[in-house]
């Protein structure tokens, strides 16, 4: 057996997203909901590092608190890529987890996408972005959007993606201390499911909404309270199916000022909205590195 281990010392970013709006248009026969949403990529998130091997072993370097390895979207993504591309290599994966789990900011989906994109490079499996996005969809509705890495409008269950660059804005993202299951929100009888389809070009924050917000605010007073507080300072909304909420600012200093007023017990971060995710930027750096070494 080849016991070669290759340590890649660099970190691969796994950024968060916000749903600047989230409209529910209806429900498909398979139970999934038809959505329209503007996914805003952020310059803030987790980081992953990969130590590749020739033995085929795939594991976390340290188990992630609250998630068994076999359920971890990182491990599931690595195994899916290995099986799909018939690759015999493995990886020991380290995560620097900064994003709250189940927060509606896409941490798990982003971790899966970063794993697919990074290992596709490090294992040299050479799948196209389209193939990686299709594989990712098996792991979660939001994985394709993170594989593509652009701020984008999404339709369908989130897989019909159109790049939609937005003006640069800053966001204060705050997460109340409650865990909200996406499946619970989507199975609620009183969830609105009849928002008309919208033309992307007509997007305007004030004229859109998050169709899950009212229901979540009714069930989780912590979310309602935080939104009521934030909206005094800036336009604010819940992201995804919660629990995180965000406020929109023109500059970083204004976002920092409001963050400083939050109770110390409320988890929060300030991030810049970006049109190309830090993962895409990392991939471009890698490619230009290979291109440079090819010509040397
Ligand atoms: C609605 C979003 C918006 O970003 O919410 P957040 O998860 O970010 O809060 C996501 O698309 C969620 O994506 P993701 O969290 O990957 O969902 P999945 O694991 O695929 O599905 C979890 C459960 O949510 C429901 N679900 C999910 C997506 C969708 N378009 N319709 C659904 O009905 C299904 O019941 C499914 O069993
Ligand atoms: N690598 C991972 N990071 C975060 N959550 C994960 C991961 N792998 C599996 N999960 C599971 O996925 C659930 C949703 O996580 P996450 O993607 O962070 O939330 P959301 O989709 O609401 O933003 C978590 O509660 C956790 O049980």
Image: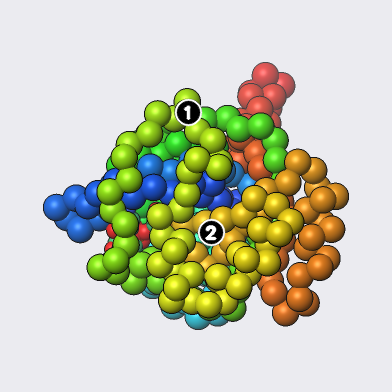
Which image quarter: residue 76? bottom left
Where is residue 236 shown, x and y percent of the image?
A: 62, 54
User: Pointer 1: residues within 10 angstroms few (<14), some, or many (20+)?
Assistant: few
Name the residue: 44% across, 64% down: 214
Disc on res. 202: 1
Instruction: Report the side of 293 relative to 4 (left or right).
Output: right
Distance from mark 1 CB to nearest ligand 1 atom below 8 Å: no
Q: Nearer the viewer, residue 285 or 170?
A: 170
Question: What coloring was used for the rendering?
Answer: rainbow
Where is residue 237 shown, x and y percent of the image?
A: 56, 55
Residue at far top of view: 295
- Ranked by sequence position, the earlier of labels 2 and 1 is 1
Q: Which residue is mark 2?
A: 238
Distance from mark 2 CB to nearest ligand 1 atom below 8 Å: no
Looking at the picture, does residue 100 appear above or below residue 210?
Answer: below
Instruction: Report the side of 7 relative to 120 (left or right).
Output: right
Name the residue: 40% across, 39% down: 154
């Amino acid at each position: 057996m080849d016991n070669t281990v290759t340590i890649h010392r660099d970190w691969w970013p796994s950024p968060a997203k916000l749903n600047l709006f989230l409209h529910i248009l209806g429900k498909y026969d398979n139970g999934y909901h038809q959505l329209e949403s503007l996914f805003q990529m952020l310059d803030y998130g987790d980081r992953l590092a990969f130590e590749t091997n020739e033995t085929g072993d795939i594991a976390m370097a340290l188990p992630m608190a609250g998630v068994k390895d076999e359920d971890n979207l990182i491990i599931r993504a690595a195994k899916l890529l290995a099986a799909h591309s018939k690759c015999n290599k493995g990886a020991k994966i380290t995560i620097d987890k900064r994003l709250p789990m189940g927060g509606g900011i896409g941490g798990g989906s982003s971790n899966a996408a970063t794993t697919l994109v990074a290992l596709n490079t490090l294992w040299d499996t050479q799948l196209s972005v389209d193939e990686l996005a299709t594989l990712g969809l098996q792991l979660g509705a939001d994985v394709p959007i993170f594989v593509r890495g652009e701020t984008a409008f999404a339709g369908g269950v989130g897989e019909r993606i159109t790049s939609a660059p937005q003006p640069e804005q800053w966001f204060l993202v705050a997460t109340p201390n409650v865990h909200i299951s996406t499946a619970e929100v989507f199975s609620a009888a009183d969830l609105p499911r009849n928002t008309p389809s919208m033309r992307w070009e007509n997007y305007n924050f004030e004229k859109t909404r998050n169709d899950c917000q009212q229901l979540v605010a009714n069930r989780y007073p912590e979310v309602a309270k935080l939104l009521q507080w934030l909206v005094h300072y800036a336009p604010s909304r819940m992201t995804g199916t919660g629990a995180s909420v965000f406020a929109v600012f023109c500059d970083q200093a204004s976002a920092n000022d409001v963050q400083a007023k939050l109770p110390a017990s409320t988890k929060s971060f300030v991030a810049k909205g970006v049109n190309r995710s830090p993962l895409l930027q990392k991939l471009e750096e890698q490619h230009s590195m290979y291109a440079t070494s090819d010509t040397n």
